[in-house]
Image: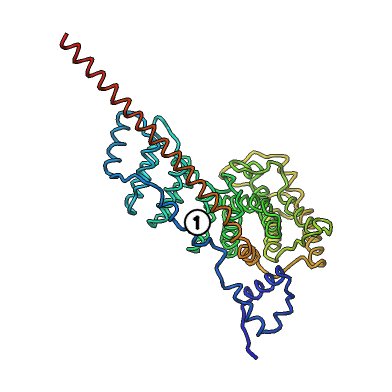
């Protein structure tokens, strides 16, 4: 008999995927049968397809060839005279980038444009072109820098553009940078596309699977991203993301107070994020929660919630009072925050009860969060791409129509200015003759 050796991770992934397909896990008792089904897990289909990332549609549009040195000189003279530079000029500069060095030049003029006296905004197609040029010429670091400093550069991508940048980091296995992109998606509340949700959860699950050492700010960012993205998903993966997100935010709330949770974040202002994470567990444990879908958790999420509760418990001394605050800065005591901290023993007890209920009802699986997200991505991403591509084709046409209109308006303005100039010269010549 042919024997197939699997790692624990691969075995758990196989079990999870079989259950999703209503294939009895007992199949795994037969190594020969397993070899015929393993192809499901070797494909990397959870990444965006070549059709999605193909730049042909974008590059096929009509562009205006320009010399970047001439454009740069013209913009410098315009700024020196304190005149406004048009968004069309900046768009031409970005469209004509042809090297990595020119990406750096374009970054300067994006910043200059954003901080000019007229303070015009960038066109959507300019932002899309900027991200594509950064990806094309190996300047993803510049794309990420301008995105993280979006207020300084005016970079607010649309959903499709976000997907391209996020996918590029995922394919490079740079999950930390991918999570920075997810954070920006979260801050801009751009989890509308199903494809964006899938890619975001894939990046988050892979990053967390490496068990990185996180700062409080990073835990807040990851928690908010998991929670808001999970709320868009009506599935086991979505519920798991909500559980993790609430737990991480609950930790920040316990250590820093509720104001440090929602400040600058599109989050619910009410206290009790740890309690809401347990509410998610209770909803999954309840038989009447959703009779048409069996919600289950994997060990990874539950272990993380347990670790958060244990860590927070260690921040309390034997008398149950919080430890002394940081000597560097005495923070103002919030009575409501203290009341929330006092609930920690109840949260620990409630978690243990819910854990027992989930285990007794068979709603805990040995697979990892990463494996469950991977299985979902493999099944759903292809279908999620189709409406995105249709919308993108329509969007490019709309952008081109708007750009042609701006070019026409620019030509009319120049003609009018030239006509007025000739009239002034004629009037001056007539006055001199008189």
Position of residue 118 relative to residue 102, above or below, is above
Position of residue 7 relative to residue 139, above or below, is below
User: Could you tell whether 400 is left or right of 286 in the image?
Assistant: left
Viewer-proximal residue, 397 or 38? 397
Q: Which residue is mark 1?
A: 177
Identity of the residue drawn at 64% across and 41% down: 259
Position of residue 73 relative to residue 182, above or below, is above
User: Could you tell whether 252 is left or right of 349 in the image?
Assistant: left
How far across and down, in percent of the image, does residue 400 sit? 44, 43
User: Could you tell whether 149 is left or right of 252 in the image?
Assistant: left
How far across and down, in percent of the image, does residue 182 sit? 55, 52
Q: Secondary structure at mark 1?
A: helix
* The N terminus - image quarter: bottom right
How far across and down, in percent of the image, does residue 22 sit? 73, 70
Local packing at callout 1 (Cα closer than 10 Å; few below 14, some 14-19, many 20+) is: many
Q: Quadrant of residue 380?
A: bottom right
**Colouring method of the image:** rainbow
Q: Residue furthest left?
A: 433
* The C terminus - image quarter: top left
Identity of the residue drawn at 28% across and 33% down: 77
Identity of the residue drawn at 60% across and 72% down: 41
How many dots with numbers? 1
Q: Residue furthest top?
A: 434
Position of residue 184 relative to residue 53, above or below, is above
Q: Residue furthest bottom?
A: 1
User: Could you tell whether 76 is left or right of 264 in the image?
Assistant: left
Identity of the residue drawn at 39% across and 32% down: 409
How far across and down, in percent of the image, does residue 230 sit? 66, 53
């Amino acid at each position: 008999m042919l024997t197939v050796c699997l790692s624990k991770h691969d075995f758990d992934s196989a079990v999870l995927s079989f259950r999703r397909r209503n294939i009895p896990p007992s199949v795994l008792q037969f190594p020969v049968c397993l070899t015929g089904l393993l192809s499901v897990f070797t494909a990397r289909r959870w990444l965006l397809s070549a059709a999605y990332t193909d730049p042909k549609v974008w590059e096929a549009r009509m562009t205006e060839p320009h010399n970047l040195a001439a454009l740069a000189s013209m913009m410098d003279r315009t700024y020196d005279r304190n005149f406004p530079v048009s968004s069309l000029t900046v768009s031409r500069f970005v469209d004509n980038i042809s090297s990595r060095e020119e990406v750096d030049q374009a970054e300067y003029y994006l910043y200059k444009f954003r901080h000019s006296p007229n303070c015009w905004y960038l066109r959507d197609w300019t932002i899309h072109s900027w991200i594509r040029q950064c990806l094309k010429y190996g300047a993803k670091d510049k794309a990420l820098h301008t995105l993280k400093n979006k207020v300084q550069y005016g970079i607010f991508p649309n959903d499709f553009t976000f997907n391209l940048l996020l996918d590029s980091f995922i394919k490079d296995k740079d999950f930390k940078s991918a999570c920075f992109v997810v954070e920006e998606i979260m801050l801009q509340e751009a989890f509308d596309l199903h494809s964006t949700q899938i890619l975001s959860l894939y990046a988050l699950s892979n990053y967390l699977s490496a068990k990185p050492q996180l700062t409080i700010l990073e835990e807040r960012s990851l928690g908010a991203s998991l929670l808001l993205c999970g709320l868009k998903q009506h599935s086991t993966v979505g519920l798991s993301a909500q559980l993790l997100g609430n737990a991480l935010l609950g930790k920040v709330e316990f250590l820093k107070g509720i104001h440090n949770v929602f400040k600058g974040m599109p989050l619910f202002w009410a206290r009790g994020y740890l309690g809401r994470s347990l509410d998610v567990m209770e909803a999954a444990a309840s038989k009447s929660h959703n009779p048409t879908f069996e919600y289950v958790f994997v060990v990874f999420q539950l272990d993380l919630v347990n670790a958060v509760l244990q860590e927070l418990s260690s921040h309390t001394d034997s008398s149950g009072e919080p430890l002394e605050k940081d000597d560097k800065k005495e923070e103002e005591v919030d009575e409501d925050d203290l009341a929330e901290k006092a609930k920690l023993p109840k949260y620990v007890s409630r978690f243990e009860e819910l854990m027992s209920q989930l285990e007794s009802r068979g709603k805990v699986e040995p697979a990892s969060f990463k494996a469950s997200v991977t299985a979902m991505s493999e099944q759903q991403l292809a279908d999620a791409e189709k409406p995105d591509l249709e919308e993108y084709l329509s969007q490019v046409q709309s952008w081109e129509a708007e750009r042609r209109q701006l070019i026409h308006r620019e030509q009319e303005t120049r003609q009018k200015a030239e006509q007025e100039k000739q009239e002034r010269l004629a009037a001056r010549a007539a006055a001199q003759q008189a």
